[in-house]
Every structure is written in structure tokens, then in C-alpha cells.
Image (tube, rainbow, N blue to C red):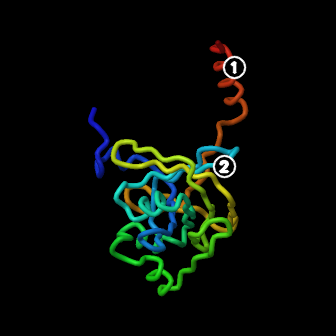
Amino acid sequence: MTALPYGSPAHHSFITNVGLITSTGPHGENVMAAEWTHHISYEPGMIAVCLGPNKATAENILATAEFGVSIASTDQNVIASIAGSKHGKEYDKVAALKELGYQFLPGATIKPPTVEGARLRAECRLIDHRTYGDHIMFVGEVQRAETDESKDPAAYHKGKYWHVGENIPKPPQEEMERIKAVVERYRK
């Protein structure tokens, strides 16, 4: 068994969403793609985002204590590719995306915008951050969230964007009852 280095076959085993993380701060308005974007609490609503410490977005969030999270929809692979492949310290990705016809919506409770057309748009205030290995986990409390039910979220796997596929059906009712009976025999 080996570790889990970047680019290894093991690294490509995960399937994630695509978080488009927006921020403002010392590096100006920025958007980056973060595959490590997770909903971690219902009450209060919280989202965790793991970012490299030298990223413009990480530095912006540390300076302002707020950020936007837009979960990319299946028609936003171009936005995700640009946001994920260029560095905010070197490129004004928001301006480039606007010129390409993409739109950002102003935040109602935070200064950073969110990405129009995303499956989910959430405005977050930073409540905690901690370094784990080579990334910082930022935890934001959701101040406001809006979903677009007409959009399907993009999935990210093996460095590519995907549509979510077929639903895997549950076993037939008879098998479900057998499974339940077996599990119940092992109740502690």
C-alpha cells in the first residue's frame, strides 16, 4: 500500500463536485475551482473548502473572512476549467469570464459575487480555518443560499467533468427485508 500523492491512480479514485469559490481582497475579485468543497453541517449550515495556502483565494479569504461557493452545473465546464487552471495572482479570471459572456451576481450578505447559473450559490462567513497537510480547510457559515433546480451539478473524476449518471436501484423489497433481518441479528 502507498500514500496518496497528487496524480496517483489512488488520487483519481474520488468523485467530487466542482466548487467555484469566489473572493475579494488583496488579490482583487477572484474565482477558483475547488474539488474539495463539502457541506459539513445542516444547523447551522456550513461549507468546508480546502485550498492551497499560497492561492490568491486563500489569501483573500484570510484577509476578508468571507467567500462565495457556487456548485458548478453541467454547462459550466468552461468556467470551471478557467477558474481551475489559471492563478488569481497572475490573471483576472472574473474579467476574462465576463468577457466570454459569463455572469457573476453580487452578494447580498458578502462582498464577493457568486456565479450565475450554478446549481447552488452560497454566501459564507469564515468561522474557522485550519491547516491539514498541504492545504488549509476553510469553514464558512452559510449566510444565504439559493439553488437552481433546473441545473444538474457537474461531477469531477479523473481530471474530467461528468454528468451524474443513472440512479443505482435498491434491491427488491424481499431482499431489503432479508438484509434488515440479518443486520438486526447483530444489534449491540
Q: Is residue 160 above or below residue 131?
A: below
- Residue positioned 64% across, 18% down in the render: 182
What residue does disc 1 label?
Answer: 181
Relative image position of residue 181 (x, y in whole percent) = 69, 19
Q: Quadrant of the N terminus?
A: top left
* Residue 10, quarter of picture: top left
- Residue positioned 35% across, 42% down in the render: 133
Amino acid at pointer 2: Gly
Q: Quadrant of the C terminus?
A: top right
Residue in the foreground of this view, choosing between 46 and 7: 46
Mark 1 closeness class: few <14, some 14–19, many ≥20 residues within 10 Å: few
**Image-based side of 153 in relation to 55, left or right:** right
Q: How far separated are the C-alphas under marks 1 and 2?
A: 36 Å
Amino acid at pointer 1: Ala
Contact, mark 1 vs mark 2 (Cβ under 8 Å): no
- Is disc 1 placed on a helix, strand or loop? helix
- Of circles 1 and 2, which is in front? 2
Q: Is residue 131 above or below residue 57?
A: above
What residue does disc 2 label?
Answer: 45
Mark 2 closeness class: few <14, some 14–19, many ≥20 residues within 10 Å: some
* Residue 173, quarter of picture: top right
- Residue positioned 50% across, 60% down in the render: 18
Relative image position of residue 67 (x, y in whole percent) = 55, 62
Residue in the foreground of this view, choosing between 28 and 94: 28
Residue in the foreground of this view, choosing between 12 and 114: 114
Relative image position of residue 116 (x, y in whole percent) = 61, 74
